[in-house]
Image: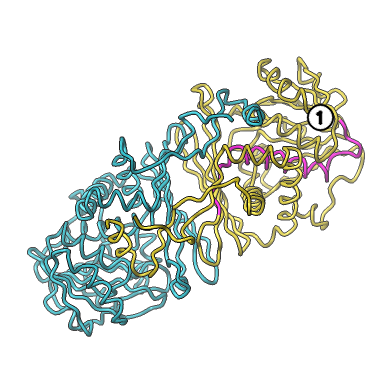
Chain colours: A cyan, B yellow
Amino acid sequence: MTQPSNKALVPFVSVDNMMRLIHHVGIEQMLIDLANYVEDDFKRWEKFDKTPRVASHSEVGVIELMPTSDGEAYGFKYVNGHPKNTSEGLQTVTAFGLMADVYTGYPVLLTEMTILTALRTAATSAMVAKYLAPKGADTMAMIGNGAQSEFQSLAMKAICGITSVRLYDTDPAATAKCAANLASTGLDVVICKTPEQAIEGAQILTTCTADKQCATILTDNMVGAGVHINAIGGDCPGKTELAAGILTRSDVFVEFPPQTRIEGEIQQMAEDFPVTELWQVINGTKTGRTSDRQITLFDSVGFAIEDFSALRYIRDRIKDSDFFFELDMLADPDDPRDLFGMVQRAAQ
Amino acid sequence: MTQPSNKALVPFVSVDNMMRLIHHVGIEQMLIDLANYVEDDFKRWEKFDKTPRVASHSEVGVIELMPTSDGEAYGFKYVNGHPKNTSEGLQTVTAFGLMADVYTGYPVLLTEMTILTALRTAATSAMVAKYLAPKGADTMAMIGNGAQSEFQSLAMKAICGITSVRLYDTDPAATAKCAANLASTGLDVVICKTPEQAIEGAQILTTCTADKQCATILTDNMVGAGVHINAIGGDCPGKTELAAGILTRSDVFVEFPPQTRIEGEIQQMAEDFPVTELWQVINGTKTGRTSDRQITLFDSVGFAIEDFSALRYIRDRIKDSDFFFELDMLADPDDPRDLFGMVQRAAQ
């Protein structure tokens, strides 16, 4: 049997190894680390190839490839979105990702990204809230208590120092699950019966609901001055969570305007609705929060560079560890022109 | 330790298992099978999403994603092209591919595709030659004796019945390697010192050279009436192999015109240079070869549907076999909303 050469092996992080890594690092520390990697890549935003995601739509869902490159490394994520999956006992969203060396074109990391995407989304939200939330914010309303809710809560605790979360979901079972999962995290958890109750006293309002339809989770009169809204759930055409009136009263911050205008909350607004690009706030060329009374809004849709940051973190973090194994995924004959000979010799 | 559920596992075909599968099926039979799968998909061409490939260019190479879908299955290939790699002992081209179920968005196959791409490229060439080459063709000139040359020769033997190959390369070592690899295949192998000598008496002229530059491997006066030219090497902007005069005298057949006009031999010609789409020949709506004197030219650049066919074949062929193992690549909690709980319980 032909043995593969070292060059042909691609480090692979399985779901099991990703969970082992999270517990080894500690989930809050990993959220902090990921937020730092995302923040670093937002600071050097202009270095990246920014391609819109490549989507293949069907009647029941979408499959997307999200590639980007900083000129040295190349990353892409495969991710599906199938809202009907939940009712069939499957995940709405599953994902995996790959990083490659731009100089050789050889992959250097293959990894599960369902869990990693949940972590990077929460880390990005909290990193952004660090810039935009009012000073001293200690309470978050968490509206929508699905798969992302615990990650959001812990990231806001680890990165922004919140001490209390107020949970609301149309399905009380989801809230109970979220509350149980957060019980031993040190967060003060309050179960709320209405969205109005959830936002009482909260300086950060996070919305993360899943229905693919234009919904109004927050109405205009619910949102007072001086809060930061972290809107996660409006992330595809036809899917929004906020009343248009809130957007009009807010300063809206986005990842990549061409994508957010199609997928985000601002799809409700005119094409020239003013937004600020977050990378410019983070590198100091634009201002974030300017007053205590201001409503800031992060219209989050998720961008390829955040996945790139997460892949880069995993690539760096697993070096010299046992949190991966090597996959024989690339044929690499001794003589590059002799692929056939390699195949032929494998019979011997 | 949490055990992954069955749904979370993705069948993976390693390089080693791909080589085992090839020897199990037999390389000529596998080329025949792949040609049948490609032919079937060309016949139902209109059912496919046809996106141009998504390329990320650098100074030294390119990394591409090639997705397509027939509405039931979704496939993509990751492939790099780095001509300078050979001089560093690496493959110019490496590839892997993935197939997913459109209905759930869940991946159903991950596989090496460096070897599989060599097989599908050769199978496609021979399937096309079956429609276009002159009747009774028994001799092929193989100009360029690199990694693709043996696969091309064997596919033309298995699918079109050629009995003799005439090899030429600017590097005699490449020709010696190709001749040695083909020695026990039953083909009559003739080593030639010039391209002119290689094409003597050949009815099929295959060009497959690797330089990323406009080269003229075949000049106009070398190509007489009644041959089929299988032009593999011209497959990216700036890379061609044939004199423009040959194109003018030929009937040119292509995979997907928008891609071929940028990447193929016809990038040398006007934007409205007439071409015939192969899928229409194969489903019987357009004619292929119409006379013994005609020069037919397959301007091959490689298209995503051919990779899809290859992925579909591997998916079908490995069922109930031991030519794969299962990768724990997709997180799949029992309760889809309880991703965090799954991570949390993994610590126990």
What residue type is disc 1 on?
Met
User: Quadrant location of the N terminus of chain B?
Assistant: bottom left
User: Quadrant location of the C terminus of chain B?
Assistant: bottom left
Q: Position of residue B7 (x, y in %)?
A: 48, 61
Q: Quadrant of the rendered structure where residue B169 is?
A: top right
- In the image, B313 versus A134, the foreground residue is B313
- Which stretch appears magenta? B109-138
Q: Chain of mark 1?
A: B
Q: Position of residue B122 (x, y in %)?
A: 71, 38
Residue found at x 26% / y 47%: A37
SS at mark 1?
Answer: strand
User: Viewed as shown, does residue A217 lie left or right of B310?
Assistant: left
Residue found at x 57% / y 29%: A2
Q: Position of residue A91 (x, y in %)?
A: 42, 66
Q: Is residue B151 above or below residue A236?
A: above
- In the image, B312 versus B50, the foreground residue is B312
Whether residue A266 can be seen here: no
Q: Quadrant of the rendered structure where residue B23 is?
A: top right
Q: Is residue B144 above or below residue A49?
A: above
Whether residue A181 can be seen here: yes
Magenta span has B127?
yes
User: Viewed as shown, does residue B294 lie left or right of B21?
Assistant: right
Q: Quadrant of the rendered structure where residue A208 is?
A: bottom left
Q: Which residue is mark 1?
A: B140
User: Viewed as shown, does residue A143 lie left or right of B339?
Assistant: left
Magenta span has A310?
no
